[in-house]
Every structure is written in C-alpha cells, then in structure tokens.
Amino acid sequence: MLSYNSFMKNSILLIGNSDGIGAAVTRALVANGTRVIGLSRSPSPLGPHGPRHIVQDIASPEYEEVLNTLLVEEGPIETCIFCAAIGSELQLPDLSQEALVIEVNFTAMVRTLATLVPGWLEQGQGHFIGLSSIADDFYNAHAPSYTASKAGFSNYLVSMGMKLRPHGVHVTNIRFGFVDTKLPKASWKPLLMTADQAAATIIRCLETKPIQHTVPKLAGAAVHLYRLAQSGRIWWR
Ligand SMILES: NC(=O)c1ccc[n+]([C@@H]2O[C@H](COP(=O)([O-])OP(=O)(O)OC[C@H]3O[C@@H](n4cnc5c(N)ncnc54)[C@H](OP(=O)(O)O)[C@@H]3O)[C@@H](O)[C@H]2O)c1
C-alpha cells in the first residue's frame, strides 16, 4: 500500500488527464483524498461531479494565460504532472501533423514549466513530473515526430532538473515502456504495463522525486542496445 500522506494537503495539477495514464493517476489520487485539478481537451474522466477540470488545448496560444488565471484562482500549486501527448504515424507524403506532435508533446511541456517555475523559485519548492518514453532513445522512421518529441522532452527535463534542484525545485522525467492505453499502435507490445501500474509508479515518484526513472528497466536497456546498433549502422554508412 502506498502512502500519499506527504502530498495529500496540496493540489496536484494534471495536464492531459481525460484518458489513459493521466486518468488512472487522477482516480488513484482522488481515491486517496488528494485534491486534483485536471486539464485536457475533453471533460474530466470522473464526470461533472469530479474534481475541478479545465477544458483546454495545450497547443493553443492562450494556454499560458489559462494557467496563470488558474494560479491566481487556486493560489500556489506545488506539483504538476504532465501526461499529455499525441502520436502520429507518418504516412508519406502527408507531413501535416508533424509540427503539431512536437507542439503538444514537447513545446507545451516547456511552456508549462516556464509558467510554473518562477513561482516555485520564489517559494523555494515545487515538483514537475513529465511522462516521457523509452522511445526517446532510438530513431523511428514510422513516427519520427513522436520519438523526436520524446528525445527533446527527456533531455530538456533532466537538464532542467539539474538546473533547478539546488533551488529546491524538483523535476522528474519518467520513461515508460508500453502502457495499455489507446496511444501505442504497435502490434507487438512486450512487457506491457497497465495504466494503473504506470499510475502507481508516478505516485511513488511524487514521494521519491528522482531526476529520471525508467520502467521497465529491461525494456529501456533493450531499446538502448537497439539504438547503439542503429548508430553504428549510420556511423559507417
Ligand atoms: N501508452 C504508452 O505505451 C506510453 C509509453 C511511453 C510513454 N507514454 C507517455 O505517457 C503519457 C500519457 O500517455 P497515454 O498512453 O495515457 O495517452 P492517452 O491515453 O492518449 O492520453 C493522452 C492524454 O493527453 C491529452 N491530450 C492530448 N492532446 C492534448 C492537447 N492538445 N491539449 C490537452 N490535452 C491533450 C488527452 O486528452 P484530450 O484528448 O481530451 O485532450 C489525454 O488525456 C504521454 O506522454 C505518453 O507519451 C505512454
């Protein structure tokens, strides 16, 4: 049984929580008495009587303004979990979704941090958890924008974690393998986790605040070996 006691008193902002892993985290936190504020394009996974939910597209120009209004209304929010992402398989010659994938998966995360961090620096505390993927570690001709967005996401978050930790602000980059949601389209999903298992991992990270966490580690190691083989082939071409 996990103990959520240390963060029960504070509100947790969940970006991208209408479905999948974000919805599973929402359910687990609410069941434990934590106050959650959700944000996604669709309504709350817990319905109209669930926790506060903002219907908002994080790729829209007014996203930061919406977040700033929320901070004024709610007061300081010490924890944010960024779960939003889209995936798009590249079907040539149509590259129309490529920039949007980078905007939602990577740029919106950078915009979220840029809005929250100044207040966290003033308070000398704060915790940002971003959901990345072991896909950050290989080249993928089927979904280049997704893997590139995750490579940038992981690199940026770990670098920001190193920058912010001395100021009392924690950043955690979680690299998942396959999780059973609508997002992954692969026909073979080795070491598949449930969304509830992924949520439990995230909740543990709320307590332990690692700078990066990879799960399952075996999948992360396998992808890294694949990446080394890819790099070798590219190097000698
Ligand atoms: N599932 C996996 O196998 C897997 C593996 C590794 C990493 N991850 C990562 O884990 C995170 C969660 O993935 P998931 O599997 O739970 O995906 P999911 O089931 O597709 O859920 C994605 C969430 O993001 C929200 N979202 C997407 N575009 C948005 C936008 N423009 N504005 C606001 N919200 C938006 C969606 O809500 P709306 O559609 O309502 O906006 C939804 O709540 C992602 O970062 C993903 O890359 C997943």
Image: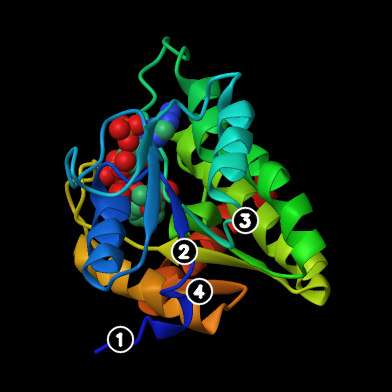
Q: Within 8 Å: ligand 1 and the Cβ of disc 2?
A: yes
State the separation of the CA atoms marked 1 and 2: 21 Å
Q: Is 13 situated above or below 229?
A: above
Q: Is residue 169 rendered to the left or right of residue 127?
A: right
Residue type for callout 4: His
Tell me the residue that label 1 is attached to.
2
Task: Give the residue drawn at x 32%, y 52%.
Answer: 22
Could you give the CA–CA distance between mark 3 and mark 2, rounded to whole angstroms? 27 Å
* Distance between the alpha carbons at the discs numbered 1 and 3: 25 Å
Left or right: where 163 falls relative to 171 = right
Q: Residue 76 carries which label?
A: 3
Q: Do the residues labelled 4 and 2 touch (CB within 8 Å)?
A: yes
Placement of 101 over or under 174, stated as above or below: above
Expressed as whole percent of the image width and height from the top left, the position of residue 70 reads 54, 39
**If you read the primary sequence from the N terminus, does the residue marked by circle 1 or circle 2 appear first?**
1
Residue mark closest to the camera, 3 vs 4: 3
Residue 175's disc is 2
Q: How crowded is mark 2: few (under 14 residues within 10 Å), some or many (20 or more)?
A: many
Q: Quadrant of the N terminus?
A: bottom left
Residue at x 30%, y 61% (from the top left corner): 25
The reply to whether discs 3 and 2 touch (Cβ–Cβ < 8 Å) is no
In the image shown, does 144 or 79 lie closer to the viewer? 79
Quadrant of the frame with the C terminus = top right
Lower position in the chain sequence, tag 3 or tag 2? 3
| Label 4: element kind | strand
Q: Residue at x 51, y 38 (%)?
A: 105
The vertical placement of 96 against 176, above or below, is above
**Residue type, mark 3 in image:** Pro
